[in-house]
Image (spheres, rainbow, N blue to C red):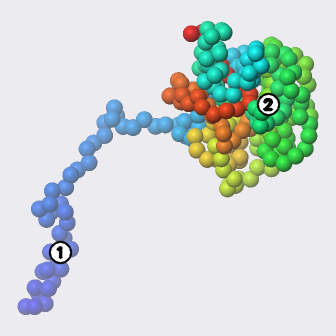
C-alpha cells in the first residue's frame, strides 16, 4: 500500500506543471508581419556611414581671418553667415598638432597650406603605409600611399595613417582579433568612385575597421583618427557638434 501511494505521488508531481496545475500561462502573442521588428543591416548597427560624390566634398581648416574652425558648430555658423549654406555632413579629417594645425599634408582649393609629412615616428599616423586622401579639380577621389602621391591637379587633400586597405587587401600589419580597440573614423573609395566615410559606433580594432571597407568593395581606405572621432550627420539623427579638431571634412547644402 505504501509503495502504491508513493508511485501515485511521484506520477502526480512529474506530470504537474504551470499549465495543468491551475496556474494560468500567458501565451506569447503572435507577431504579425507589420509588428515584426525590422532587420537592421550589420553595418548600420555598428557603423555610422555616409556616401557622396567626390565633387560634394570640401575640406575646411581656417576662416578668411585666420581663425581655425576647430569644431562643427563654428564651421556651420560660418557657412550660414558667409555662404548661406549649412552642413549636412561633417567629420574630423585627420590628425593634428596641439595648435589644431594638420600633422601632415593639407591642400585647400588648390593651395598647399601644409607640406607632405615624410618623417618617420611613433603612433598611428606613422604606421606604414601612411596615405593621402585627395580630390582632383575634375572631381575624382583617390587614396594613395604618401610615396605615390603627386600634388598636380589637386583641389583638396589631407594626409593621415595608416592606410588600412591597400589595393584591395587589408594592411598586413593589422592583426585579426587585436585587443587594441577604439572609436575610429576613416574614408574609402567605392567601386563607382564615390567617397564612403565611416565612424564606428563602438570600440573596434584596426582589422575589423579595415574589413568594413573591404566588404564595401573599396580598394583603398585610410584611417583618419580615433578616440576623438566625431561625425555630424543629422539625417541619421547624429547631431553632435562638439569636440575640437584640425581639418574638417564637410558636405553642405543651401539653406
Question: Height in image: 132 above or below 179?
Answer: above
Question: Height in image: 76 above or below 246?
Answer: above
Q: Is residue 221 visible?
A: no
Quadrant containing the C terminus is top right
Give the residue at mark 2. Answer: 101
Looking at marks 1 and 2 on the same chain, the residue that comes earlier in the sequence is marked by 1
| Left or right of residue 63: residue 10 | left
- State the separation of the CA atoms marked 1 and 2: 77 Å
Q: Position of residue 229 (x, y in %)?
A: 66, 37
For this rendering, which residue is in front, 207 or 34? 207
Number of residues whose C-alpha sits closer than 10 Å to that of mark 1, classed few (under 14), some (14–19) or many (20 or more): few
Seen at 64% across and 43% down, the residue is 183
Q: Position of residue 222 (x, y in %)?
A: 76, 35
| Left or right of residue 18: residue 33 | right
Quadrant containing the N terminus is bottom left
Q: Secondary structure at mark 1?
A: helix
Seen at 20% across and 66% down, the residue is 17
Q: Position of residue 239 (x, y in %)?
A: 54, 28
Q: Quadrant of residue 131?
A: top right
Seen at 26% across and 48% down, the residue is 28
| Left or right of residue 209: residue 160 | right
Seen at 69% across and 28% down, the residue is 70
Q: Position of residue 189 (x, y in %)?
A: 73, 28
Point out which mark residue 125 bears: none
Point out which mark residue 13 bears: 1
Number of residues whose C-alpha sits closer than 10 Å to that of mark 2, classed few (under 14), some (14–19) or many (20 or more): some
Question: Height in image: 119 above or below 56?
Answer: below
Question: Height in image: 185 above or below 70?
Answer: below
Q: Is residue 63 visible?
A: yes
Q: Quadrant of residue 150?
A: top right
Amino acid at each position: 500500500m505504501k509503495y502504491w501511494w508513493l508511485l501515485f505521488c511521484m506520477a502526480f508531481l512529474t506530470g504537474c506543471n504551470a499549465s495543468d496545475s491551475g496556474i494560468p500561462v500567458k501565451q506569447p502573442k503572435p507577431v504579425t508581419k507589420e509588428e515584426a521588428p525590422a532587420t537592421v543591416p550589420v553595418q548600420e548597427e555598428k557603423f555610422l556611414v555616409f556616401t557622396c560624390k567626390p565633387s560634394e566634398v570640401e575640406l575646411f581648416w581656417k576662416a578668411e581671418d585666420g581663425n581655425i574652425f576647430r569644431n562643427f558648430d563654428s564651421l556651420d555658423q560660418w557657412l550660414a553667415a558667409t555662404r548661406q549654406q549649412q552642413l549636412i555632413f561633417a567629420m574630423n579629417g585627420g590628425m593634428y598638432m596641439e595648435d589644431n594645425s594638420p600633422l601632415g599634408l593639407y591642400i585647400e582649393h588648390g593651395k598647399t597650406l601644409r607640406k607632405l609629412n615624410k618623417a618617420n615616428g611613433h603612433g598611428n599616423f606613422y604606421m606604414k603605409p601612411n596615405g593621402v586622401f585627395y580630390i582632383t579639380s575634375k572631381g575624382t577621389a583617390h587614396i594613395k600611399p604618401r610615396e605615390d602621391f603627386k600634388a598636380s591637379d589637386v583641389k583638396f587633400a589631407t594626409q593621415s595613417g595608416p592606410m588600412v586597405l591597400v589595393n584591395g587587401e587589408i594592411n598586413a600589419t593589422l592583426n585579426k582579433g587585436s585587443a587594441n580597440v577604439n572609436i575610429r573614423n576613416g574614408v574609402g573609395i567605392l567601386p563607382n568612385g564615390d567617397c564612403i566615410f565611416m565612424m564606428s559606433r563602438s570600440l573596434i580594432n584596426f582589422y575589423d575597421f579595415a574589413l568594413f571597407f573591404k566588404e564595401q568593395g573599396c580598394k583603398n581606405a585610410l584611417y583618419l583618427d580615433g578616440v576623438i572621432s566625431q561625425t555630424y550627420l543629422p539625417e541619421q539623427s547624429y547631431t553632435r557638434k562638439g569636440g575640437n579638431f584640425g581639418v574638417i571634412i564637410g558636405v553642405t547644402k543651401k539653406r
